[in-house]
Amino acid sequence: MAKAKKSFLIVGNWKMNPETAEEARSVFSAVARLAAKHKGQSVVVAPPAAFIASLSKKGSPLSVAVQDVSHEASGAFTGSVSAKQAKSAGASYAIIGHSERRAVGDTDELVAKKASRALEAGLRIVLCVGETERDEHAQYLRNVRGQVLSVLSAIDKKEAKDIAIAYEPVWAIGKSYDTAPSPLDIHEMVIYIRKVAAEALGKKLGLAIPVLYGGSVDSKNAKDFLSNAGIDGLLVGRQSLDPKAFGSIIEYAASI
């Protein structure tokens, strides 16, 4: 019997791009056409919050994510987007704890609150964890462990099925493939993250959580990462705005 192909979770984070709703619809439609050819893969696009409602459609081959949510349910928090609002607008995923949010003040405690709000609202979450730098005393491992445990130790175990963890080493962002982590480096961290998840949730639930990789992912290195890093998917940044490049990444996932 032929071995079934693996289904990966491929997430595209558009950050604060593109500039107009028209451009967003154009890119989204192009990616949707490519994703429709590979229905065995789970593809998620995270546009700016202003575009979620206009992009999310029933029956689309793409799921939509919100890039961040408030740690509060509602109230006087100008400029914030609540998890329930994102869900109502059509999001089914939320990116939580992205390195760019942590860089402007999101502590582990705040990330845990945001994760809880998102799960309460019925959103699946992509929890971003990762060190800013590596040190010879392996403090970075303790930092990643703390980021994982701050969320997993605060949730109801039944919510574990709605969580994916994206390993995103901050020091690797913007690096070339030659200087970014190797698939072996990533695989070692994936094993470590799964071990920490199992510590928090028990072996069965912890090992079932998908672990993605994010950090200078592009159409040139994606296949190597997907094939050799022991990951369950990718968190893609700038190249998710290029339908051709992002489509190639989806195609690579489908070929493995």
Image: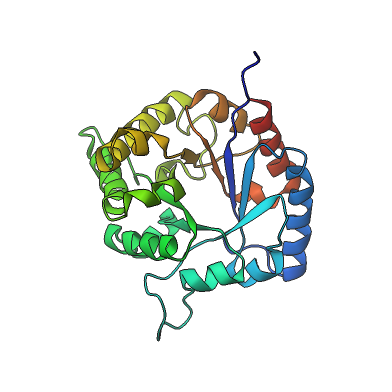
Q: Is residue 75 visible?
A: yes
Q: Is residue 134 visible?
A: no
Q: Is residue 8 above or below residue 240?
A: above
Comparing 255 with 213, the one in front is 255
- Residue 4 at x, y percent in the picture: 62, 23
- Residue 104 at x, y percent in the picture: 38, 64
Q: Is residue 95 above or below residue 186?
A: below
Q: Quadrant of the C terminus?
A: top right
User: Which residue ends up furthest to the bottom in the rendered image?
Assistant: 76
Comparing 171 with 235, the one in front is 235
Could you tell me which residue is drawn at 65 percent across and 15 percent down?
2
- Residue 148 at x, y percent in the picture: 31, 46
Q: Is residue 65 above or below residue 187?
A: below
- Residue 144 at x, y percent in the picture: 30, 43
Image quadrant where residue 143 sits: top left
Image quadrant where residue 39 sits: top right
User: Which residue ends up furthest to the left in the rendered image?
Assistant: 137
Q: Is residue 188 above or below residue 245?
A: above
Could you tell me which residue is drawn at 42 percent across and 36 percent down?
208
Could you tell me which residue is drawn at 77 percent across and 43 percent down?
34
Image quadrant where residue 24 sits: bottom right
Judged left or right of residue 251, residue 188 is: left
Comparing 135 with 47, the one in front is 47
Could you tell me which residue is drawn at 39 percent across and 66 percent down?
117
Instruction: Count how many numbered circles sit on residues in the image.
Output: 0
Q: Quadrant of the N terminus?
A: top right
